Image: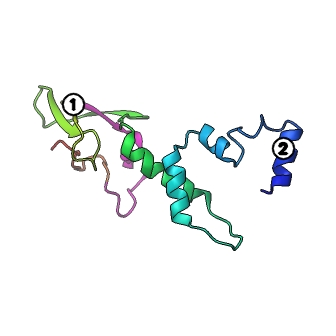
Amino acid sequence: LSKRKLIHLVTYNYVNGWSDPRMPTLSGVRRRGIPPEAIHLFNERNGISKVDSVIDYSLLEDATREVMDKICPRAFCILQPLPLKIRNYLDQEEILCAPRHPSRENSDNRSIPFGPSIYIERDDFFDTQVDGKAPKGWKRLVPGGMVRLKYAY
């Protein structure tokens, strides 16, 4: 976008000033939650050029993801839970440990309860009775199939 077009958006109140998160300005980008380190990394990767060029927005997102991955805590959740009953497992529940961040060596561990009744993500299960045969290369759970549960057995 040219400065002339951006001035038009601000003047006619299509946006709430230069710092509106929809604006491609430094203050707008900062209000989107992108840390300064990510902007610096983005600029380092693109360098300086006298030639006009179009830079893909995904490069800024990638720099942001890389910076945020180092400083943000990780969380785990199942968005679409599917209850699962394990038939050949003891009736007792145990607590398993898994690293909170897979690529950080210093990260603390989180506790995962594991027992005969667990929940998995619905997308990780392929119901052959409803959808037919599982696609070639399907590595997730199917009725009567076996899978390895990460950080478990």
Q: CA distance from mark 1 to mark 2?
A: 50 Å
* Residue at the image position 86 percent from the left and 53 percent from the top: 4
Q: Is residue 135 magenta?
A: yes
Q: Amino acid at mark 2?
A: Leu
| Residue 111, numbered label | 1
Number of other residues with Cα within 10 Å of mark 1, as a class: few under 14, some 14 to 19, many 20 or more = few
In this image, 46 relative to 124: left or right? right
Which residues are the magenta region? Answer: 117-139
Assign the C terminus to one quadrant of the image. Answer: top left
In this image, 35 relative to 29: left or right? left
Q: Nearer the viewer, residue 117 or 51?
A: 51
Q: Amino acid at mark 1?
A: Ser
Q: Which numbered mark, 1 or 2, is in the foreground of this view?
A: 2
Tell me where residue 104 appears, x and y as whole percent. 26, 47
| Residue 8, numbered label | none
Q: List the single residue furthest toward the bottom.
A: 51
- Residue 72 occupies which quadrant of the picture? top left
Number of other residues with Cα within 10 Å of mark 2, as a class: few under 14, some 14 to 19, many 20 or more = some
Tell me where residue 2 appears, x and y as whole percent. 80, 57
* Residue at the image position 88 percent from the left and 40 percent from the top: 11
In this image, 19 relative to 34: left or right? right
Q: Nearer the viewer, residue 128 or 104?
A: 104
Disc 1 or 2, which lies upstream in sequence? 2
| Residue 9, numbered label | 2
The reply to whether callout 1 and callout 2 are in contact (CB within 8 Å) is: no
- Residue 82 occupies which quadrant of the picture? top left
Secondary element under disc 2, as helix, strand or loop, is helix
In this image, 73 relative to 30: left or right? left
Secondary element under disc 1, as helix, strand or loop, is strand
